[in-house]
Image: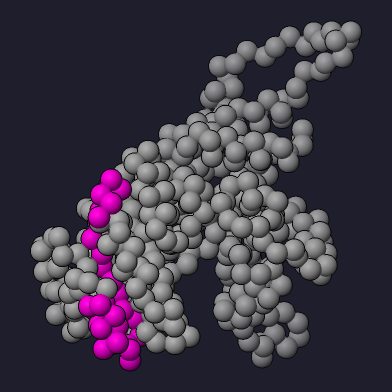
Amino acid sequence: MIIKKYTGKTEDDAVAAAKKELGTNIVIMNVKNVKPSGLFRFFKPQLIEVTVAREEENEKAVFIKKEAAPEESKAEAQAKTASVKEDIKRPVEEIGQKLDSLQSLLEKQIQSKSEEVQPKAEETSEEEGTQEKSEQEKQNDRFMKLLYNTMIENEVSEKYANQIIDGAEKNAKSNTSIDALLSTIYQRTILKFGQPSGIKRGERNPKVVFFIGPTGVGKTTTIAKIASKFCVMDKCKVALLTADTYRIAATEQLRTYASILEVPLRVIYTVEDMKSAIADFMSYDYILVDTAGHSYKNEEQRNAMLAFLNGVDESIEKEVYLVLSATTKYKDLLTITDTYAELTQYKLIFTKLDETSSFGNLLNIKLHTGAEMSYVTCGQNVPDDIEDFNPQRTVRMLLGGKNE
């Protein structure tokens, strides 16, 4: 894992410098203002410091089903070596604000549990050549077990919880402090989520964006929230298409939102209808397409979905977002994501975060699919209850911290 700091006049400048050196697969760990120093500091502009991290390829390949990344250059390899030596030892206080009260909470629980455990007699057989674990190692063992149980309680899959704990233990030394262990697990888990990848303007207009997923997950409301953001905040031209002709209520709901936003809505029944609509809206920034939810057992619906996805001309930019509910059972999510993966590549949107207290499935599905996270929703209010996925806040909750 590489952790480095970059400064710039703006956050975008600092992030651009980080991406230039480390590549695009970085995660922003912290952003803060840096006061200028020196004799003429009052005349110097304030800078923005961004702390970023990137997971090394040999770590990433264990969890994410993606093609191997191209070999890094010699300069990148040297940068990795230098940064690991210098930056991995940075004080845990730098992420203390993100962890909130997690550290003190865990230490209190560890202390209470340690009082219940009677110390073993220090009678070690010299013939066996073994030694009692140090008190630090014992405390670390209890700490790691507590973290593991916390993740399991938050419905992280045993498979991934074990991988996270094993990865931290493998790189820990006998005298590693609890602070360092917590810092390592926190940072590595954030890296597994990666930076959110939302909808952005394409190099050419329009960008066609499909929203797919099972029924009842909130696709139509999610589209309305995103359309509202583009129209009201970004001042973009948006057109709406719906291929969900199975549910009249969904079409009418989208028609209501289209009327409020004063954007065109077109109902499409065939691929030809879709192509005609795209041709009519070529001057628009975004064309958002609502699709019908389908059962993985219904081959006819699967074929209809595939026809729409493949019906967009290759000269037009296209993205696909799979909308999932955070309240859906893990086993069902595996079936859903695998089914849609047979049709197309997609990014992930999770809805209904306000209806669950366990967020383990966000990590489970991210690691199972390797797909990029984009947005999460936490209510029915349009356009307020949607935001970019926040890996830092999510990991903090998975490890037992507060949802703030």
Q: Is residue 108 above or below residue 300?
A: above
Nearest the eye: 395 or 276: 276
Magenta-drawn stretch contains 298: yes
Task: Determine whether, in the image, residue 194 is placed left or right of residue 347.
Answer: right
The magenta segment is: 272-300
Q: Residue 114 at x, y = what percent?
A: 59, 22
Name the residue located 71 percent from the left edge and 59 percent from the top edge: 2
Magenta-drawn stretch contains 182: no
Q: Quadrant of residue 43?
A: bottom right
Q: Is residue 207 above or below residue 293?
A: below
Q: Residue 58 at x, y = what percent?
A: 70, 51
Name the residue located 70 percent from the left edge and 64 percent from the top edge: 70
Task: Determine whether, in the image, residue 157 is placed left or right of residue 64.
Answer: left
Task: Determine whether, in the image, residue 131 is placed left or right of residue 117.
Answer: right
- Quarter the C terminus occupies: bottom left
Nearest the eye: 51 or 109: 51
For the image, the number of numbered tags is: 0
Q: Residue 146 at x, y = what percent?
A: 54, 31
Name the residue located 53 percent from the left edge and 25 percent from the top edge: 112
Residue 311 visible in the displayed image? yes
Name the residue located 75 percent from the left edge and 22 percent from the top edge: 133
Q: Residue 229 at x, y = what percent?
A: 31, 76
Residue 397 visible in the displayed image? no
Q: Is residue 51 above or below residue 397?
A: below
Q: Quadrant of residue 345?
A: bottom left
Q: Quadrant of residue 228?
A: bottom left
Q: How is the image coloured?
A: one colour
